């Protein structure tokens, strides 16, 4: 067995091939985890302020989530493809290919934004009218979603440039960018929603403007940090040479990740439809759950985002021992975080819901919802770790298949069948059923990937 401390490598090799794995995972993942915690915090703060407008405003934001998630999926999926390919090229010591990957990624980011610019002008009203006949919710939703989509260039640009920093091991700089955007959003939320410090009260539109302005700040900061600090990438367009091969390599990993996130949007949309047959309050509860669970899931995603460049780099460099150790350490840390989250949801559900000005009906639905859904957290930790490994090894299709099994073939049918009982609280058990199916698929896929790609190194 290969001893990672005795691997002889050139002195100029990137730290992802030389630094002890435990220390490297902490150094790369911790900034991502902190920044994603801040991201989760501002998502929760955003909803806390919106809930002060009315429950209908909170429901509108919940209904808007699938489209917002679709945007994030497009941006993050493309970023995952860039991250995996760029890290692999770093491991292969191909500096020209590194820069070409980055420049092609920036081009793809621009075209992604154009798609949602068009959607923002054409889709929102039709989208909300298909989900509810409550006119106030429709008007709130159209106002909020149109701003978030039309001005989404900040979201797309920030995610891409942050991924470029992450893929070259500069996660502290990525953290600075994300925190700058998140803090901007948090500060502007009450000012723009309620009209403080001389600003007009914009209501739910103020929440949307606070979000997009925060994203633009993150874009500016991440762009400047890349240009000034990211010496592994040459951003000069003089070196750009368009290549369908590079785009194909990015989307080989990126498209499955995009589809994986898009399936989540479809799931949320259809689940909202199922919950809507009971009440709009049930939709609001599901939206609150999604905001709260992000405070547990986001650090795990940050942790797993950290192992993508580590595994990809060491796979390119053929350091098997470093790959396996990274996976083990990441899985242990992810499960530990999820167990903590499970404990909080089980012990303090009423306090968590209390942040959103809940009605008695919301508490009646929400308390059992949080306690039941949280049971799947530790299992989800394992699945998230394995899907990140699949992405790092260029096997993003496996991540997509596991997600389809969980959300389309398990969660939705289970939720629909359980809704037929006439008790909204039974629907939440669908999450437990789906996560069990996902774990089975991920375990089988991981065994296959290990035998074919890792064990043979």
Image (cartoon, rainbow, N blue to C red):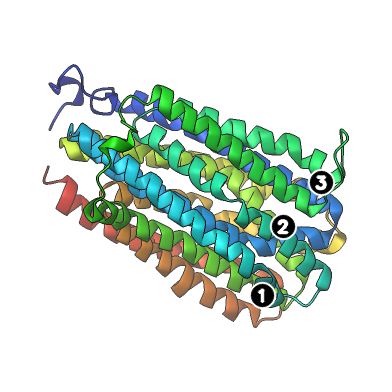
Mark carried by residue 126: 1
Q: CA distance from mark 3 to mark 1?
A: 25 Å
Q: Residue furthest top?
A: 11
Taking depth in this image into account, of 388 and 188 the one nearest to the observer is 188
Q: Which residue is mark 3?
A: 193
Q: Residues within 10 Å of mark 1 (few under 14, many from 20)?
A: few
Helix, strand or loop at label 3? It is: helix
Residue 147 location, quadrant: bottom right
Q: Which residue is mark 2?
A: 144
In contact (CB < 8 Å): disc 2 and disc 3: no
Residue 24, x across and y down, in percent: 35, 26
Q: Residue furthest front?
A: 238
Q: Tell me if residue 321 comes above or below residue 257 in the rendering.
A: above
Task: State the residue at coordinates (52%, 39%).
Answer: 299
- Which one is earlier in the sequence, the residue at label 2 or at label 3? 2
Helix, strand or loop at label 2? It is: helix
Residue 366 location, quadrant: bottom right
User: In this rendering, would 9 be left or right of 159?
Assistant: left
Residue 125, x across and y down, in percent: 70, 71
Task: State the residue at coordinates (68%, 65%).
Answer: 63
Taking depth in this image into account, of 169 and 432 the one nearest to the observer is 169
- Which one is earlier in the sequence, the residue at label 2 or at label 1? 1
Q: Tell me if residue 293 comes above or below residue 175 in the rendering.
A: below
Q: CA distance from mark 2 to mark 3?
A: 12 Å
Helix, strand or loop at label 1? It is: helix
């Amino acid at each position: 067995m290969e001893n990672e401390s005795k691997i002889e490598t050139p002195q100029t090799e990137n730290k992802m091939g030389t630094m002890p794995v435990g220390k490297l995972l902490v150094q790369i993942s911790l900034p991502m985890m902190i920044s994603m915690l801040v991201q989760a915090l501002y998502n929760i703060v955003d909803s806390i302020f919106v809930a002060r407008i009315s429950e209908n405003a909170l429901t509108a934001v919940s209904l808007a989530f699938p489209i917002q998630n679709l945007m994030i999926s497009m941006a993050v999926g493309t970023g995952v493809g860039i991250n995996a390919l760029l890290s692999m090229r770093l491991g292969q010591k191909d500096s020209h290919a590194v820069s070409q990957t980055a420049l092609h990624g920036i081009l793809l980011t621009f075209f992604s934004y154009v798609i949602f610019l068009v959607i923002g002008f054409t889709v929102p009203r039709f989208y909300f009218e298909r989900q509810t006949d409550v006119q106030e919710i429709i008007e709130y939703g159209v106002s909020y979603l149109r701003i978030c989509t039309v001005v989404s260039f900040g979201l797309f640009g920030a995610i891409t440039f942050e991924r470029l920093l992450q893929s070259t091991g500069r996660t502290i700089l990525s953290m600075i960018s994300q925190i700058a955007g998140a803090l901007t959003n948090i500060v502007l939320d009450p000012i723009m929603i309620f009209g403080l410090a001389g600003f007009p009260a914009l209501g739910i539109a103020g929440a949307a403007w606070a979000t997009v302005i925060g994203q633009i700040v993150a874009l500016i900061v991440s762009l400047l940090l890349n240009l000034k600090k990211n010496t592994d990438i040459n951003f000069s367009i003089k070196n750009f040479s368009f290549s369908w091969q590079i785009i194909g390599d990015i989307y080989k990993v990126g498209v499955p990740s995009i589809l994986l996130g898009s399936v989540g949007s479809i799931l949320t949309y259809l689940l909202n439809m199922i919950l809507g047959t009971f009440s709009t309050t049930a939709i609001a509860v599901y939206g609150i759950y999604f905001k709260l669970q992000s405070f547990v899931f986001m650090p795990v995603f940050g942790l797993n985002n950290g192992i993508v460049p580590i595994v990809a780099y060491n796979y390119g460099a053929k350091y098997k021992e470093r790959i396996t150790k990274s996976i083990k350490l990441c899985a242990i840390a992810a499960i530990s975080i999820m167990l903590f989250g499970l404990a909080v949801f089980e012990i303090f559900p009423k306090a968590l819901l209390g942040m959103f000005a809940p009605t008695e009906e919301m508490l009646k639905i929400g308390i059992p919802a949080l306690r039941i859904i949280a049971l799947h957290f530790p299992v989800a930790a394992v699945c998230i770790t394995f899907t990140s490994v699949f992405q790092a090894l260029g096997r993003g299709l496996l991540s997509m298949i596991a997600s389809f099994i969980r959300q389309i073939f398990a969660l939705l049918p289970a939720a629909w069948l359980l809704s037929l009982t006439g008790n909204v609280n039974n629907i939440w058990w669908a999450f437990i059923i789906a996560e069990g199916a996902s774990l089975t698929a991920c375990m089988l896929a991981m065994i296959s990937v290990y035998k074919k790609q890792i064990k043979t190194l």
